[in-house]
Image (cartoon, helix red, strand yellow):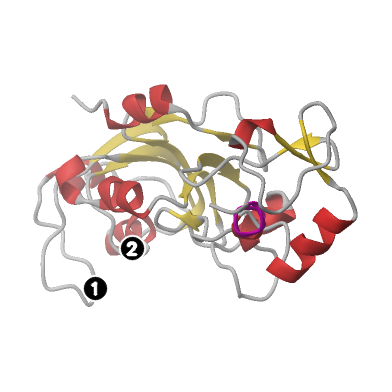
Amino acid sequence: MKLVKLLANLGYGSRKQVQLMFREGRVTDADGEVLYADDLLAHEAIRVDGEPLDPPHGLTLLLHKPRGYTCSTKDKGRLIYDLLPPRYRERSPLLSSVGRLDRDTSGMLLMTDDGALLHRIVSPKSRLDKAYEVTLAEDLRGDETARFASGTLLLESDDKPLLPAELLVQSPRQAQLVLHEGRYHQARRMFAAVGNHVQALHRSRIGGLSLGDLGEGQWRTLDAGDLDTLFNVP
């Protein structure tokens, strides 16, 4: 791939803007030698303003999403892309969220520009469960664990019962909920179905991969070992 197209696809600017970067001598090799648009060089050897290039296509990252941010490129207000380097929003292929967390839900969010990987993660065949930490408005009654595990709970406006889910009660108003499917606002709707209201919702794990010590608003790239951990489901 020509260097102009490579840098444009990584979000450094339009092709016209990237061509100007070459004319200004801002694109160099690791030794500081100025590069030209038709040079052929390994990705890791290219520098822009003295800094290594952003990761190539195939980028996957884990973001600790705070409350108040939307999983969108266009909505008004704070977006998850505001937490990343500005260029990441302009990458082609698009760096997309793998599924969504609503504005008021915090926690673990995966993002990737690899379409095949995205579909593998969301596919039911991968059996990637998701764990949520839940804070409730009212005390639990005591029958919720059995109802969620029954496989018979039917949400409002749905015509198919939910798959069995695990509820681990931690205190009268706090619990961990593990889901094996991903219906719209599922966790919130499940508690609404048993007469309660979710005050705070935080996703802490997807498959075998957890947030670890990643702070709110922070992110990190995932490597092959991380993806093996993600899919390492018993």
- Is residue 124 highlighted in magenta? no
- Closer to the camera in the image, 163 or 37: 37
The residue at the point 73 percent across, 56 percent down is: 86
Residue 191 placement (x, y as % from top left) = 34, 56
- Is residue 4 highlighted in magenta? yes
- Closer to the camera in the image, 157 or 82: 82
The correct choice, above or below, for 19 with respect to 37 in the image is below
Magenta-drawn stretch, dominant element (helix, strand or loop): helix
- Say whether residue 141 is visible: yes
The correct choice, above or below, for 161 with respect to 127 in the image is below
Give the SS element for disc 1.
loop
Residue 14, label in figure: none
- Closer to the camera in the image, 211 or 21: 21
Give the SS element for disc 2.
helix
Residue 105 placement (x, y as % from top left) = 52, 54
**In the image, 52: left or right of 102?**
right
Residue with the mark numbered 1: 156
**In the image, 201: left or right of 64?**
left
The residue at the point 26 percent across, 39 percent down is: 128
Q: What stretch is highlighted in magenta?
A: 3-7
Q: Are marks 2 and 1 in contact (CB under 8 Å)?
A: yes
Which of the two discs, 2 and 1, labels the residue nearer the N terminus?
Answer: 1
The correct choice, above or below, for 168 with respect to 14 in the image is above
Residue 189, label in figure: 2
